[in-house]
Amino acid sequence: MFSLFVARRYLFARKRHHTTGLISAISVCGVALATAALVVTLSVFNGFREMVASFFTAFDPELKVTLAEGKTLAADDPALAKLRAMEDIEVYTEVLEDQALIVGNERQWVITIKGVSDNFAQQADMESLLYGDGEFVLHADVLDYGVMGIRLAAALGLGTSYEGGLPIYAPRRGERVNMGNPMQSFNRDELYSPGVVFAVNQGKYDAGYIVTSLAFARQLFDQQSQVSAIELKLRPEADLHKAQAKIRAILGDRFRVQDRYEQQEDTFRIMQIEKFIAYIFLSFILLVASFNIIGSLSMLMIEKRENVQTLRALGANDRQIGQIFLFEGWLISGIGALVGIGIGLALCWVQIQFGLVKLGQTEGAFLVDAYPVSVQSSDLLLVFATVLLVGLIAVWLPVRHMIKGLFCA
């Protein structure tokens, strides 16, 4: 294209005035720095997202089936029987989950009791989450064990193990509270310590959950033969998204089938919103940096005034002349984008390899010592497209007005 060819020659040719070349270089540097900031910031948000996801995967199932409306359903529901027969499912775990009151060391705490089938350890790989001298046991003979989160144990003043039974209270179904003797309106039972606690590094679980047997939860909540969720672990060769779609087709609209990200939708939505806001703010900074290109183009137009008259004499029209300087500004944006992406990738690589930027001064104060970084190709494409679009917006109107003033008089 004629206009692009001339614009490229103008950009890389020796300038008559050194000031023109210097301003062009400053424009490229400004765009490059803003672009690098975009790449690094978005990559840090990706790193935090993947870090949070890695913590959830240790406790949350690959797929979780719950009712779309309602809280519990019969464990022998015909729809669940079809689900249990699927070949892609390796571990099928029944769960009954509800809130209860725990009393320990003269302290009270509202917590979530998660009653699970005996195969839950295969579902959640609990061995990797445990602290203490015992082992993950849900029941033995007439005793029911409760494995609590590490922060809950600390809040109750308990260690990884405790002596005697820990009282658990839950409201009786369908009964009003007797104000004269409120405790008559609660079911009471006791859980014993298996000598371990679990740590998922998420406050929702570590400070508010106790995992126990399904039989204990059903008795405590008066929910015999009921489940609140089905947690599924797929066979290694199964495709998660295909299996999820197949399960949804089998169960119908009565049920929700959620993967790990959907189970923690609120958390990841907030992180995505924060990432988007950071992207918007940095894009405005990029727009401000792109205005430096206008100065560069103004100097170039003044310098090339005679050349433009020659081009017009050779047959170039006003539209083609305008495109020359628009392409000039776009080339400056494109070069700045490529340089900035390169700088951003280099900074991300250094952070991944050496962790130079720390989260805090004290080592071990956070779950990770340095800012996590994860570069995604989709973000790089987004950044490159954003720089080109912002560069076009920044020069479009100013260039049109300057051309009219300089060359159309």
Image: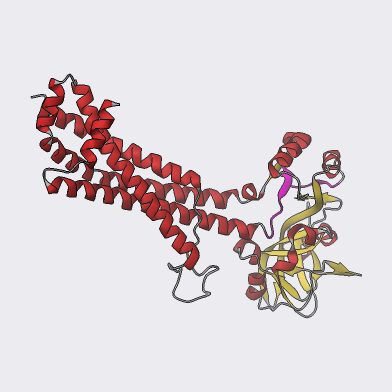
Report the front residue among 293 and 168: 293
In terms of image quadrants, where is residue 216? Answer: bottom right
**Is 307 located above or below residue 117 in the figure?**
above
Furthest-top residue in this view: 315
Q: Where residue 44 appears, x then y in whole percent?
A: 47, 57
Using the rendered image of the protein, determine whether residue 296 is visible from the camera's viewpoint. Answer: yes
Furthest-left residue in this view: 409
Left or right for 145, reference 374? right
Magenta stretch: includes residue 70: yes
Magenta stretch: includes residue 340: no
| Image point (61%, 51%), residue name | 264
Q: Where residue 226 appears, x then y in whole percent?
A: 83, 50
Left or right for 269, reference 168? left
Q: Quadrant of the N terminus?
A: top left
Which stretch is magenta? 58-75
Q: Where residue 354 appears, x then y in whole percent?
A: 47, 68
Report the front residue among 17 and 14: 14
Left or right for 104, reference 398? right
